[in-house]
Image: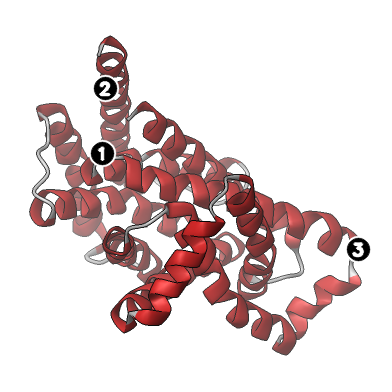
Amino acid sequence: MGRGIALSVGATTLFALLSVYTRILRPLDGLDIFAWRIVWTVPGALLLVWLRGRWGELRALAWASVREPLRAAMLVAASALLGLQLWLFMWAPLHGRLLEVSLGYFLLPLSMVLVGRIYYRERLVPLQWLAVGFAALGVAHELWVTHAFSWPTLVVAVGYPPYFMLRRKLGGDSLATFALEMLLLLPVAVALVALRPGAQAALHQPLLWAAYLPGLGALSTVALASYLAASRLLPMALFGILGYVEPVLLVLFSVTLLGETLSATQIGTYAPIWVAVAMTAVHSVLLLREQQRD
């Protein structure tokens, strides 16, 4: 379990850094960056498959998808859900909407905990219930103040749980599945690059196409592969609660590096959730100590 926790925290840190990384990719917009991210993530994903000796798993998954229409449909659906999240994450920092996305990531662990408790029948320890309670308090404050959530918030909070449920149903090696998802998204990305003048503009800026975009692919590959591996190694509820680390970093980066503002009203939403994050950290440390004793 310690490996799963480390992978989850490392992945969320890299994801948060990607939100800042988009600023150096101007003049590309969110859809352009999404397309190039897929293009440059595919080689990295295939390289990871080769380095870890997972070609057999990748071929087996691809062949199983060809033979089983239901599995193929599930894989296509999972790829589409993942693609939507990747696009939103690239779009939001460029349009001053990263705080709204970060709220979605704050809500996501609550969604995952509910899925784990209701669908997978996972049990929560008292400290986890307490963390969920504080997070729910922050959510209730947001609803009381705004009476609604923005669409970027809902896309994250509602869109990710079905994706992870599909991934668990698909089974198999997490890295091989990730690589196949990227391959399924690649034709869409290539079409966007071919059709969008903004995406093609990157080809006329050597530093952009030779350094910054490959760097985006490398960061994406390591972060996504680690995150998906963690989703398979950890109980759904714990995996969901650890997701609170990323939105904390997103808020920090959006305010300190991207120039977005956090109002006093918003602090009423975030403060209880930050308490939940602290409780999550305590719970993770206790789990690690228990594992070390065993």
Residue at 40% across, 67% down: 152
- The picture places residue 181, in percent across and down from the top left corner, at 49, 68
Residue on which disc 1 sits: 238
* Lateral position of residue 177 relative to residue 237, left or right: right
Secondary structure at numbered mark 2:
helix
Residue at 12% across, 36% down: 124
Q: Quadrant of residue 177?
A: bottom left
* 3 or 2: tag closer to the N-terminus: 3
Residue on which disc 3 sits: 206
From this viewpoint, is residue 85 visible? no
* 1 or 3: tag closer to the N-terminus: 3
**Vertical position of residue 94 compared to residue 244: above or below:** below
Quadrant of the drawing holding the C terminus = top left
Task: Measure the C-alpha gap from mark 1 to mark 3.
Answer: 43 Å
Are discs 1 and 2 less than 8 Å apart at CB? yes
Name the kind of residue labelled 1 in the image: Leu
Residue at 21% across, 43% down: 237
From this viewpoint, is residue 165 visible? yes
- Residue toward you, 226 or 276: 226
Residue at 63% across, 52% down: 50
Q: Quadrant of residue 160?
A: bottom left
Using a 10 Å C-alpha cutoff, classify the residue at mark 2 as few (fewer than 14 neighbours), some (14 to 19) or many (20 or more). some
Secondary structure at numbered mark 1:
helix
- The picture places residue 225, in percent across and down from the top left corner, at 51, 50
Secondary structure at numbered mark 3:
helix
* 1 or 2: tag closer to the N-terminus: 1
Name the kind of residue labelled 3 in the image: Pro
